[in-house]
Amino acid sequence: MPRIGVTGHRDIPAAALPSVRSAIRAELGDATGGVEALSSLAAGADQLFARIALDCAVPLTAVIPGMDYEAHLGGDEVRASYRRLLASCVARVDLPAEPTHEDAYYAAGRWIVDHVDRLVAVWDGRPARGPGGTGDVVAYARRTGVPVTVLWSPGARRS
């Protein structure tokens, strides 16, 4: 079964959301013979991708960075969404501890890239704001030959 992973920004501008949602649905729906989705279930793109996968009856695997992940996800709403999504996953991969949170996020992104047939990137095309960000994961995928589909709305800017 083909596997599609996701990387993306935590903050997706409202102007970009409709096209990103539609594009994720198309990416997941275009896979013939079924597909499996992989996500770290972080706020923003990861949770959006995971929700759409589940809405489309696509099996979802959670890839959990090696850190106190849930405590660093954001507010109560994001953590509650994370728990709901995690409970709906068909599998969970817990990665080993890393020295920093940035290292843990990047390790999770690389793990996803190393275990998928293609990567969906909800990405504005700009460099990562910190080590292990979306731009770094996209660069890693491209270096290793994993096809990347960038989803973004032209002209949309992150805050």
Image (cartoon, rainbow, N blue to C red):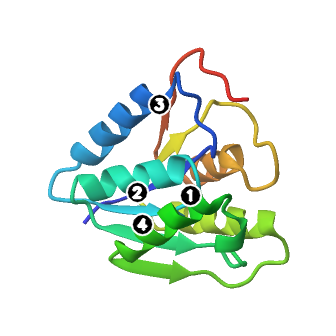
Between marks 4 and 2 in the image, the one whose residue lies nearer the viewer: 4
What label does residue 85 carry, if any?
4
Q: CA distance from mark 3 to mark 4?
A: 20 Å
Label 1 sits on residue: 77
The quarter of the displayed image where residue 108 is located: bottom right
Q: CA distance from mark 1 to mark 4?
A: 12 Å
Label 2 sits on residue: 50
**128 and 21: which is toward the camera:** 21
Label 3 residue SS: helix
Q: CA distance from mark 3 to mark 1?
A: 19 Å
Provide residue 25's location: percent of width, then percent of height.
30, 41
Q: CA distance from mark 4 to mark 2?
A: 7 Å
Between marks 3 and 1 in the image, the one whose residue lies nearer the viewer: 1
Q: Are marks 3 and 2 in contact (CB under 8 Å)?
A: no
Label 3 sits on residue: 17
Residue at x-position 57% and y-position 58%:
78
Provide residue 14's location: percent of width, then percent of height.
53, 27
Q: Are marks 1 and 2 in contact (CB under 8 Å)?
A: no
* In this rendering, position of residue 116 left or right of residue 58: right
Residue at x-position 80% and y-position 42%:
129
Instruction: Tell me the crowding category of disc 4: few under 14, some 14 to 19, or many 20 or more residues within 10 angstroms, Cα based.
Output: some
Q: Quadrant of the C terminus?
A: top right
Q: Are marks 4 and 2 in contact (CB under 8 Å)?
A: yes
